[in-house]
Amino acid sequence: MKRIILAIVSVFSVATLFPQGVGFTCAKVDERGCVFLGWHYAMEQDGFFSCTVERQLDENYDTVAIFQNLGTTSFVDTSGVAGSVVVKYRITATYDNNISYSDSIQTVLLNVVNNSGNLVLAFLSWNNPFVGSLEGGSYTVLRKIKNKTDWHPVVTTSALFYQDTVKQSVCHDTVMYTVFAIAGHDTLVSSKSKGSLFVDPLPTTPCKLDVVTVDEPTQMIHLSWEPSPDNDIWGYFICQGNPCMALDTIYGKYNTSYVAENHECTSVHDYRIYAFDSCFTASALTDYYHNIVLKGEAVDCKNEVSISWNEYINMPDGLGYYRIYVRYDNSSAFRHLHLVEVGQPLQHNFVVPTNVADVYVKVVAVGKNSEYVSESNILHVNMFVPDTAKFVYIRYASVNEKNKNIDLLFYVDSAFVADSYQLYRKTYGRGYTLYDNIPYTGESLLSYTDSNVDVENVRYTYCLAVKDACGGSEKRSNEASPVFVKLKTKDNVNYVSRTDYVGWDSVEYYYVCRRRETESEWETIGRMWPWEGSFADDISEIPSLRERLFYKVVAYQASVGDYIFQDSSHSQHVVYSRKGDLWVPNTIIPSMPGNDVFKPSSTFMRADGYLLQIYDRSGLLVYSTKDIDEGWDATSKGEPVPMGTYVYIIFCTFSDGTNDVFKGTVTVLK
């Protein structure tokens, strides 16, 4: 404040003295209402006696100070009344010759009236402080926004009033004013500063919507709007959703576009915008507007695409129609496909040319005057083959233990709901034929038993297939065929040969298994590597071989390939058997060890189905046994039989399954 006063005073020289007597040079009111008075004396000062300062509040003057020292040229009235009323002062200089000279001045009382109309206005008025010898003058108005700015001159005028328009933002602040008056002999008078609380009275004018669209190259949502017509606009708030939640702030009156980088253009987003001024006073929200989201897919089992989209709202000039654009495969240019009028369903189906793999579609909303357009997202539709199972696999094909059926186990994509699975079968020299349909169960593992087989003589190969969702092309599994085994015998050596297992990427090894006819457990007697095709089994080492021998080969899956389950597959059984021999002694001597028992000896005769009977000459049965290892010791009911000739009958079954009866006589000697 002092700097402002000094600047104003410096314009006028205060060195000029009054031509005679005494005259006021200053009357300043401070913030407390106290008045600082200053004066000067005339050049001729001989005979000075005293100086009297008087104050007038009503009709009469009251003496407030008397000075007899010519060097005293100022006085402060601390009564404080000048802050609310106009105070008039008179100064009188008296000399020895009883001559006196006087001068008068009065304080400036500033009135500030706050107007809250369409602009931030202050109506200022004040009184004329110049009386007595002072004539006319000019007034300088200073202004500051409390606690925000320094004092600044606003206007210099000769009038006793001024209307101030606060052009800078006054949001909720106290605006202070003071007046300096200068007249006459460079006399300076200043008022007490006064102010008033101002608030921003101007509502912020809303902006207008332009469009929200999806940028074709980037597929990002772009918002645009028209600027608010107000001069005092600092920016715009963007919100989304209902209720509308703050999304972002854009600064600058003419920054009227926004890219919603974090919003997917495949979802509908509601947006509203409002302007704000330098006081952050917000305008009313605009109406909602949102992006167009295009959805669609290829029609099942048809060369056709079906699309739909949401309505575009609040087009500035009203919605005119929608245009559908399409491009195929690697083409870069969209072409117009169809026009949809307002009021028609927001959907469309169209046929795609044959052999087109990729279809790209977009919808454009157009205003009535074609000035405004809003584009949707670009929809990509793949026109490749219909949905089908991701995999169909035969885990194994194996001859079961009964050597009558072939067991199959499948691993399928259960997520694909199929009508059924098609089982194909082929034999040597023939192609695949559809053999059976296996129902869909929703399980990933399916089992199947083929009982219409001749596993001993025919090798079978299988393939499983599933049709696509349109019942068209099939997805086929791997082929699967069990190991097929053959047997040859030479010089008491059985040679087991095999084919490869079909269906796995690799077989780790083949095991050769054997069992007797009367046994249930298989014995592993050897191993064949994948590159070995046969195995030799020396049966001469097998004692008391009477029944048939069964052979089979078991394949084990190696740990390679796409589907690894470490499965096994059994071949069919092959049988080794031959016509047995029977040797029957013709003499028995009970007293001779080593020849005291009648016991036929045999090879490849089965233990079951055996019966030995001994009769005397009268036809009486003297001995009978079913134990092939038991002989007759020439006794009957525990007593030795008489010497003589006896008849034997032997019933037997050989390992090849043939039955025979042997009859003859045996002589008992002493």
Image (cartoon, rainbow, N blue to C red):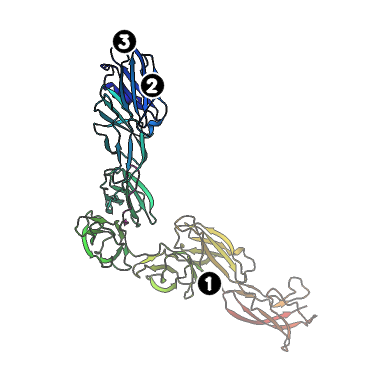
Q: Farthest residue in the right direction?
A: 639
Q: Nearer the viewer, residue 57 or 86?
A: 57
The residue positioned 73% from the left and 89% from the top of the image is 618
Q: What span is in magenta?
A: 277-289
State which mark lies toward you, 1 or 3: 3
Q: Nearer the viewer, residue 512 or 497?
A: 512
Quarter location, residue 519: bottom right
Q: Quadrant of the N terminus?
A: top left
Q: Nearer the viewer, mark 1 or mark 2?
A: 2
Task: Specify the amino acid type for callout 1.
Answer: Asn
Q: Earlier in the sequence, mark 1 or mark 3?
A: 3
Q: Measuring from the top left, give residue 401's x and y in whole percent.
A: 55, 70
Residue that mark 3 sits on: 46
Distance (Cα) linking label 2 and label 3:
23 Å
Amino acid carrying label 2: it is: Phe
* Residue 429, above or below 155: below
**Viewer-side residue, 173 vs 355:** 173
Picture quarter containing residue 163? top left
Q: Secondary structure at mark 3?
A: loop
Give the mark, 1 or 2, whose residue is nearer the N terminus: 2
Q: Which residue is mark 1?
A: 403
According to the picture, the residue beneath numbered tag 2 turns out to be 75
Badge 2 or badge 3: first in the primary sequence: 3
Q: Which mark is residue 300?
A: none
